Amino acid sequence: MKTLLKTTATAIAMTLAANAATAEGKVVLYHWFEYIPQELLDKFQEQTGIEVVMDTFDSNEALLASLKAGGMGTYDLAVPGDYMVSIMAGEGMLDDIAEGELANKGNIMAEWADPAFDPGRNSSIPYQWGSTSFMVNRDVYDGAINTTDIIFNPPEELSGKINMLDSQAEVLLLGSLHLGIPQCSTDRDQLKALNDLMQSSKEHWVSFNSDTAKEVLVSGDAAAGMIWNGFGAKAREEGANVEYAYPDQGLTVWMDNVVLLKDAPNRENALKFMDFLLEPENMGAVTNYARYAAGVDGVADYLDDALKTMPEQNPPAGIKTVFVEVCDEATQAVYDQIWTNLKK
Protein backbone atom coordinates (compact mmCIF):
# COMPACT_ATOMS: atom_id res chain seq x y z
CA MET A 1 0.00 0.00 0.00
CA LYS A 2 2.80 2.42 0.87
CA THR A 3 4.47 1.64 -2.45
CA LEU A 4 1.18 2.24 -4.28
CA LEU A 5 0.64 5.51 -2.48
CA LYS A 6 4.18 6.61 -3.22
CA THR A 7 3.82 5.67 -6.88
CA THR A 8 0.47 7.48 -7.12
CA ALA A 9 1.85 10.57 -5.43
CA THR A 10 4.81 10.56 -7.79
CA ALA A 11 2.49 10.28 -10.79
CA ILE A 12 0.37 13.17 -9.55
CA ALA A 13 3.46 15.30 -8.95
CA MET A 14 4.72 14.53 -12.45
CA THR A 15 1.32 15.45 -13.93
CA LEU A 16 1.23 18.74 -12.02
CA ALA A 17 4.76 19.52 -13.10
CA ALA A 18 3.87 18.79 -16.73
CA ASN A 19 0.80 21.01 -16.49
CA ALA A 20 2.86 23.80 -14.95
CA ALA A 21 5.41 23.51 -17.75
CA THR A 22 2.61 23.73 -20.30
CA ALA A 23 1.14 26.75 -18.55
CA GLU A 24 4.53 28.49 -18.61
CA GLY A 25 4.61 28.07 -22.37
CA LYS A 26 1.40 29.87 -23.29
CA VAL A 27 -0.67 33.00 -22.95
CA VAL A 28 -4.45 32.86 -23.30
CA LEU A 29 -6.01 35.78 -25.17
CA TYR A 30 -9.68 36.73 -25.45
CA HIS A 31 -9.93 38.85 -28.58
CA TRP A 32 -12.26 40.24 -31.21
CA PHE A 33 -12.63 38.15 -34.35
CA GLU A 34 -10.48 38.93 -37.43
CA TYR A 35 -8.42 41.51 -35.59
CA ILE A 36 -4.83 40.24 -35.41
CA PRO A 37 -2.72 38.55 -38.09
CA GLN A 38 -1.74 34.95 -37.41
CA GLU A 39 1.75 35.79 -38.65
CA LEU A 40 2.22 38.12 -35.69
CA LEU A 41 1.19 35.42 -33.21
CA ASP A 42 3.65 33.06 -34.91
CA LYS A 43 6.38 35.70 -34.65
CA PHE A 44 5.78 36.07 -30.91
CA GLN A 45 6.02 32.32 -30.42
CA GLU A 46 9.21 32.11 -32.49
CA GLN A 47 10.83 34.88 -30.45
CA THR A 48 9.74 33.75 -27.01
CA GLY A 49 8.69 30.11 -27.20
CA ILE A 50 5.30 31.17 -25.78
CA GLU A 51 2.20 29.93 -27.59
CA VAL A 52 -0.75 32.32 -27.96
CA VAL A 53 -4.05 30.53 -27.40
CA MET A 54 -6.94 32.70 -28.59
CA ASP A 55 -10.72 32.67 -28.22
CA THR A 56 -12.89 35.33 -29.88
CA PHE A 57 -15.98 37.39 -29.07
CA ASP A 58 -18.12 39.71 -31.18
CA SER A 59 -19.12 42.54 -28.83
CA ASN A 60 -17.99 44.22 -25.64
CA GLU A 61 -21.15 43.01 -23.94
CA ALA A 62 -20.46 39.41 -24.98
CA LEU A 63 -16.94 39.72 -23.57
CA LEU A 64 -18.24 40.91 -20.21
CA ALA A 65 -20.95 38.25 -20.02
CA SER A 66 -18.48 35.47 -20.84
CA LEU A 67 -15.99 36.57 -18.21
CA LYS A 68 -18.73 36.86 -15.59
CA ALA A 69 -19.97 33.39 -16.51
CA GLY A 70 -16.66 31.76 -15.62
CA GLY A 71 -13.98 33.13 -17.91
CA MET A 72 -12.02 34.81 -15.13
CA GLY A 73 -9.02 32.67 -14.25
CA THR A 74 -9.08 31.13 -17.73
CA TYR A 75 -7.85 34.08 -19.80
CA ASP A 76 -4.76 36.18 -19.25
CA LEU A 77 -5.58 39.08 -21.56
CA ALA A 78 -8.69 40.53 -23.17
CA VAL A 79 -9.28 43.34 -25.68
CA PRO A 80 -12.23 45.51 -24.54
CA GLY A 81 -13.26 48.87 -25.87
CA ASP A 82 -12.70 52.05 -23.88
CA TYR A 83 -15.98 52.16 -21.95
CA MET A 84 -15.77 48.43 -21.20
CA VAL A 85 -12.35 48.92 -19.59
CA SER A 86 -14.04 51.24 -17.08
CA ILE A 87 -16.81 48.73 -16.43
CA MET A 88 -14.39 45.83 -15.99
CA ALA A 89 -12.24 47.86 -13.61
CA GLY A 90 -15.33 48.66 -11.56
CA GLU A 91 -16.15 44.94 -11.45
CA GLY A 92 -12.69 44.14 -10.09
CA MET A 93 -11.74 42.16 -13.19
CA LEU A 94 -8.43 43.90 -13.97
CA ASP A 95 -4.97 43.50 -12.49
CA ASP A 96 -2.56 46.35 -11.78
CA ILE A 97 0.58 46.68 -13.87
CA ALA A 98 3.38 47.87 -11.63
CA GLU A 99 5.90 50.49 -12.68
CA GLY A 100 8.65 48.82 -14.70
CA GLU A 101 6.70 45.68 -15.58
CA LEU A 102 6.31 46.87 -19.18
CA ALA A 103 9.65 47.85 -20.69
CA ASN A 104 7.97 49.44 -23.74
CA LYS A 105 5.29 51.43 -21.93
CA GLY A 106 7.05 54.64 -23.01
CA ASN A 107 6.10 53.85 -26.62
CA ILE A 108 2.46 54.70 -25.94
CA MET A 109 1.47 57.94 -27.68
CA ALA A 110 1.06 60.84 -25.27
CA GLU A 111 -2.61 61.35 -26.19
CA TRP A 112 -3.38 57.74 -25.20
CA ALA A 113 -1.09 57.46 -22.17
CA ASP A 114 -3.55 58.70 -19.54
CA PRO A 115 -7.09 58.04 -20.76
CA ALA A 116 -10.09 58.64 -18.53
CA PHE A 117 -11.13 54.99 -18.83
CA ASP A 118 -7.77 53.78 -17.41
CA PRO A 119 -5.81 56.63 -15.78
CA GLY A 120 -2.08 56.17 -16.13
CA ARG A 121 -2.65 52.96 -18.08
CA ASN A 122 -2.88 51.11 -14.79
CA SER A 123 -4.19 47.88 -16.35
CA SER A 124 -4.07 48.31 -20.13
CA ILE A 125 -2.19 49.28 -23.24
CA PRO A 126 -3.71 50.81 -26.41
CA TYR A 127 -4.44 48.39 -29.24
CA GLN A 128 -6.28 50.08 -32.12
CA TRP A 129 -8.72 52.95 -32.42
CA GLY A 130 -11.26 53.90 -35.02
CA SER A 131 -14.86 54.86 -35.65
CA THR A 132 -18.25 53.21 -36.07
CA SER A 133 -20.65 54.43 -38.74
CA PHE A 134 -22.36 52.73 -41.68
CA MET A 135 -21.71 51.98 -45.34
CA VAL A 136 -23.97 52.04 -48.36
CA ASN A 137 -23.72 50.03 -51.56
CA ARG A 138 -23.49 52.62 -54.33
CA ASP A 139 -24.79 50.13 -56.91
CA VAL A 140 -28.07 50.10 -54.98
CA TYR A 141 -28.38 53.71 -53.82
CA ASP A 142 -26.65 56.78 -55.24
CA GLY A 143 -28.23 59.48 -53.09
CA ALA A 144 -26.82 61.43 -50.13
CA ILE A 145 -25.70 59.17 -47.28
CA ASN A 146 -24.22 61.44 -44.62
CA THR A 147 -27.27 61.29 -42.42
CA THR A 148 -28.51 58.78 -39.84
CA ASP A 149 -31.81 58.72 -41.74
CA ILE A 150 -30.09 56.07 -43.88
CA ILE A 151 -30.37 53.71 -40.89
CA PHE A 152 -33.51 54.89 -39.11
CA ASN A 153 -35.63 56.26 -41.96
CA PRO A 154 -34.04 54.77 -45.06
CA PRO A 155 -34.94 55.34 -48.70
CA GLU A 156 -37.00 52.60 -50.34
CA GLU A 157 -33.93 51.18 -52.11
CA LEU A 158 -32.34 50.31 -48.76
CA SER A 159 -35.33 49.44 -46.60
CA GLY A 160 -35.23 45.80 -45.50
CA LYS A 161 -31.63 45.47 -46.66
CA ILE A 162 -29.73 46.93 -43.68
CA ASN A 163 -27.44 44.96 -41.37
CA MET A 164 -26.95 46.32 -37.85
CA LEU A 165 -24.05 45.54 -35.56
CA ASP A 166 -25.02 43.26 -32.71
CA SER A 167 -23.58 45.84 -30.35
CA GLN A 168 -25.92 47.41 -27.83
CA ALA A 169 -23.82 50.42 -26.92
CA GLU A 170 -23.08 51.45 -30.50
CA VAL A 171 -26.58 50.92 -31.89
CA LEU A 172 -28.24 52.85 -29.05
CA LEU A 173 -25.64 55.61 -29.27
CA LEU A 174 -26.34 56.00 -32.99
CA GLY A 175 -30.03 56.25 -32.13
CA SER A 176 -29.31 58.91 -29.52
CA LEU A 177 -27.31 60.91 -32.05
CA HIS A 178 -30.17 60.61 -34.53
CA LEU A 179 -32.63 61.98 -31.96
CA GLY A 180 -30.22 64.60 -30.64
CA ILE A 181 -30.52 63.35 -27.04
CA PRO A 182 -27.70 62.76 -24.56
CA GLN A 183 -26.25 59.39 -23.71
CA CYS A 184 -27.30 57.96 -20.35
CA SER A 185 -30.42 60.10 -20.39
CA THR A 186 -32.73 59.83 -17.40
CA ASP A 187 -35.51 61.81 -19.07
CA ARG A 188 -38.54 59.52 -19.48
CA ASP A 189 -39.69 61.20 -22.69
CA GLN A 190 -36.26 60.88 -24.27
CA LEU A 191 -35.95 57.23 -23.26
CA LYS A 192 -39.42 56.51 -24.66
CA ALA A 193 -38.44 58.24 -27.90
CA LEU A 194 -35.31 56.08 -28.14
CA ASN A 195 -37.30 52.92 -27.53
CA ASP A 196 -39.92 53.98 -30.09
CA LEU A 197 -37.19 54.72 -32.63
CA MET A 198 -35.72 51.26 -32.22
CA GLN A 199 -39.11 49.61 -32.58
CA SER A 200 -40.11 51.59 -35.66
CA SER A 201 -36.73 51.17 -37.35
CA LYS A 202 -36.24 47.44 -37.04
CA GLU A 203 -38.69 46.77 -39.87
CA HIS A 204 -36.02 48.27 -42.14
CA TRP A 205 -33.27 45.97 -40.83
CA VAL A 206 -32.62 42.52 -42.20
CA SER A 207 -30.09 41.28 -39.63
CA PHE A 208 -27.99 41.88 -36.52
CA ASN A 209 -24.50 40.61 -37.26
CA SER A 210 -21.12 41.86 -36.15
CA ASP A 211 -18.84 39.04 -37.21
CA THR A 212 -20.22 39.10 -40.78
CA ALA A 213 -20.72 42.87 -41.06
CA LYS A 214 -18.12 43.02 -43.82
CA GLU A 215 -19.12 39.83 -45.59
CA VAL A 216 -22.79 40.77 -46.04
CA LEU A 217 -21.75 43.99 -47.75
CA VAL A 218 -19.25 42.23 -49.99
CA SER A 219 -21.73 39.49 -50.94
CA GLY A 220 -24.60 41.92 -51.49
CA ASP A 221 -26.77 40.25 -48.84
CA ALA A 222 -27.05 43.71 -47.30
CA ALA A 223 -27.19 46.96 -49.24
CA ALA A 224 -26.20 49.04 -46.21
CA GLY A 225 -25.02 48.39 -42.72
CA MET A 226 -23.40 49.62 -39.57
CA ILE A 227 -19.71 48.84 -39.58
CA TRP A 228 -16.38 49.69 -38.00
CA ASN A 229 -14.21 51.76 -40.29
CA GLY A 230 -11.45 49.16 -40.65
CA PHE A 231 -13.94 46.46 -41.59
CA GLY A 232 -15.44 48.97 -44.01
CA ALA A 233 -12.07 49.55 -45.65
CA LYS A 234 -11.64 45.80 -46.07
CA ALA A 235 -15.08 45.50 -47.69
CA ARG A 236 -14.18 48.19 -50.20
CA GLU A 237 -10.73 46.69 -50.84
CA GLU A 238 -12.37 43.30 -51.47
CA GLY A 239 -14.34 44.81 -54.35
CA ALA A 240 -17.64 45.99 -52.88
CA ASN A 241 -18.82 49.31 -54.30
CA VAL A 242 -19.48 50.73 -50.84
CA GLU A 243 -18.98 54.14 -49.26
CA TYR A 244 -18.39 54.93 -45.58
CA ALA A 245 -20.75 57.59 -44.22
CA TYR A 246 -19.87 60.50 -41.97
CA PRO A 247 -23.34 61.49 -40.76
CA ASP A 248 -23.98 65.11 -39.85
CA GLN A 249 -25.49 63.95 -36.55
CA GLY A 250 -22.13 62.43 -35.53
CA LEU A 251 -20.51 59.03 -35.17
CA THR A 252 -18.85 56.88 -32.53
CA VAL A 253 -15.12 56.81 -31.95
CA TRP A 254 -13.50 54.16 -29.79
CA MET A 255 -10.22 52.70 -28.65
CA ASP A 256 -9.71 48.99 -28.08
CA ASN A 257 -7.20 48.07 -25.41
CA VAL A 258 -5.32 45.01 -24.23
CA VAL A 259 -6.06 44.53 -20.53
CA LEU A 260 -4.35 42.32 -17.96
CA LEU A 261 -7.03 40.25 -16.25
CA LYS A 262 -7.20 39.54 -12.54
CA ASP A 263 -5.90 36.09 -11.62
CA ALA A 264 -4.29 35.62 -15.02
CA PRO A 265 -2.86 32.09 -14.94
CA ASN A 266 0.09 33.09 -17.16
CA ARG A 267 0.71 36.63 -15.91
CA GLU A 268 4.40 36.91 -16.84
CA ASN A 269 3.75 35.64 -20.35
CA ALA A 270 0.86 38.08 -20.66
CA LEU A 271 3.16 40.99 -19.83
CA LYS A 272 5.66 39.76 -22.42
CA PHE A 273 2.92 39.74 -25.04
CA MET A 274 1.82 43.25 -24.10
CA ASP A 275 5.43 44.45 -24.40
CA PHE A 276 5.68 42.71 -27.78
CA LEU A 277 2.61 44.59 -29.03
CA LEU A 278 4.08 47.90 -27.88
CA GLU A 279 6.96 47.53 -30.34
CA PRO A 280 6.14 49.81 -33.31
CA GLU A 281 6.85 47.20 -35.98
CA ASN A 282 4.49 44.71 -34.34
CA MET A 283 1.66 47.17 -33.75
CA GLY A 284 2.18 48.36 -37.31
CA ALA A 285 1.52 44.81 -38.50
CA VAL A 286 -1.79 44.87 -36.58
CA THR A 287 -2.75 48.20 -38.16
CA ASN A 288 -1.90 47.06 -41.69
CA TYR A 289 -4.04 43.97 -41.16
CA ALA A 290 -6.98 45.53 -39.31
CA ARG A 291 -7.02 48.88 -41.22
CA TYR A 292 -7.58 51.02 -38.12
CA ALA A 293 -5.09 53.30 -36.29
CA ALA A 294 -2.59 52.61 -33.54
CA GLY A 295 -1.81 54.31 -30.24
CA VAL A 296 1.93 53.59 -30.36
CA ASP A 297 4.70 55.98 -31.37
CA GLY A 298 6.83 54.98 -34.35
CA VAL A 299 4.16 52.90 -36.07
CA ALA A 300 3.95 55.27 -39.06
CA ASP A 301 7.28 53.97 -40.39
CA TYR A 302 5.74 50.51 -40.85
CA LEU A 303 2.34 51.36 -42.36
CA ASP A 304 1.02 50.73 -45.84
CA ASP A 305 0.84 53.89 -47.96
CA ALA A 306 -2.84 53.18 -48.66
CA LEU A 307 -3.72 53.92 -45.03
CA LYS A 308 -2.71 57.55 -45.46
CA THR A 309 -5.48 58.27 -47.99
CA MET A 310 -8.05 55.65 -47.02
CA PRO A 311 -11.45 57.40 -46.94
CA GLU A 312 -12.50 55.40 -43.88
CA GLN A 313 -9.54 56.87 -41.98
CA ASN A 314 -9.92 60.48 -43.08
CA PRO A 315 -13.15 62.13 -41.87
CA PRO A 316 -14.14 65.56 -43.13
CA ALA A 317 -13.26 68.52 -40.95
CA GLY A 318 -15.74 69.38 -38.24
CA ILE A 319 -17.43 65.99 -38.00
CA LYS A 320 -18.89 65.31 -34.55
CA THR A 321 -17.34 62.32 -32.78
CA VAL A 322 -18.34 60.83 -29.42
CA PHE A 323 -17.13 58.02 -27.18
CA VAL A 324 -19.59 55.67 -25.52
CA GLU A 325 -20.32 56.79 -21.95
CA VAL A 326 -20.69 54.52 -18.94
CA CYS A 327 -24.13 54.97 -17.34
CA ASP A 328 -24.94 54.49 -13.68
CA GLU A 329 -26.46 51.13 -12.81
CA ALA A 330 -30.09 52.26 -12.69
CA THR A 331 -29.88 54.13 -15.99
CA GLN A 332 -28.04 51.26 -17.66
CA ALA A 333 -30.87 48.93 -16.67
CA VAL A 334 -33.26 51.06 -18.74
CA TYR A 335 -30.98 50.94 -21.77
CA ASP A 336 -30.63 47.19 -21.33
CA GLN A 337 -34.42 46.91 -21.46
CA ILE A 338 -34.62 49.01 -24.63
CA TRP A 339 -32.10 46.64 -26.21
CA THR A 340 -34.01 43.59 -25.01
CA ASN A 341 -37.20 45.02 -26.49
CA LEU A 342 -35.44 45.58 -29.79
CA LYS A 343 -34.05 42.06 -30.02
CA LYS A 344 -37.38 40.31 -29.27
Image (spheres, rainbow, N blue to C red):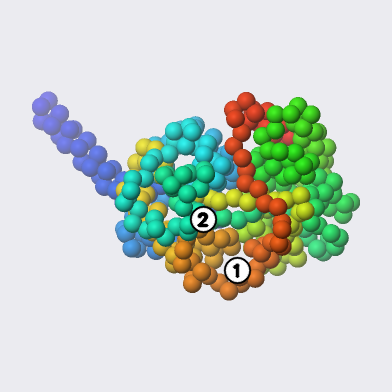
Q: Amino acid at mark 1?
A: Leu
Screen quadrant of the C terminus: top right
Q: Residue at x 52, y 39 (%)?
A: 86
Q: Quadrant of residue 200?
A: top right
Q: Amino acid at mark 2?
A: Glu
Q: Which residue is mark 2?
A: 111
Alpha-carbon neighbours of circle 2 within 10 Å: few (<14), some, or many (≥20)? few
Estimate the x, y position of residue 285 in percent, counting from the top left.
49, 65
Alpha carbon distance from label 2 to label 1? 20 Å
Estimate the x, y position of residue 126 in percent, counting from the top left.
48, 53
Q: Quadrant of residue 20?
A: top left
Estimate the x, y position of residue 291 in percent, counting from the top left.
59, 62
* 2 vs 1, front mark: 2
| Marker count (numbered) | 2
Q: Which residue is mark 1?
A: 307
Q: Is disc 1 placed on a helix, strand or loop? A: helix
Screen quadrant of the N terminus: top left
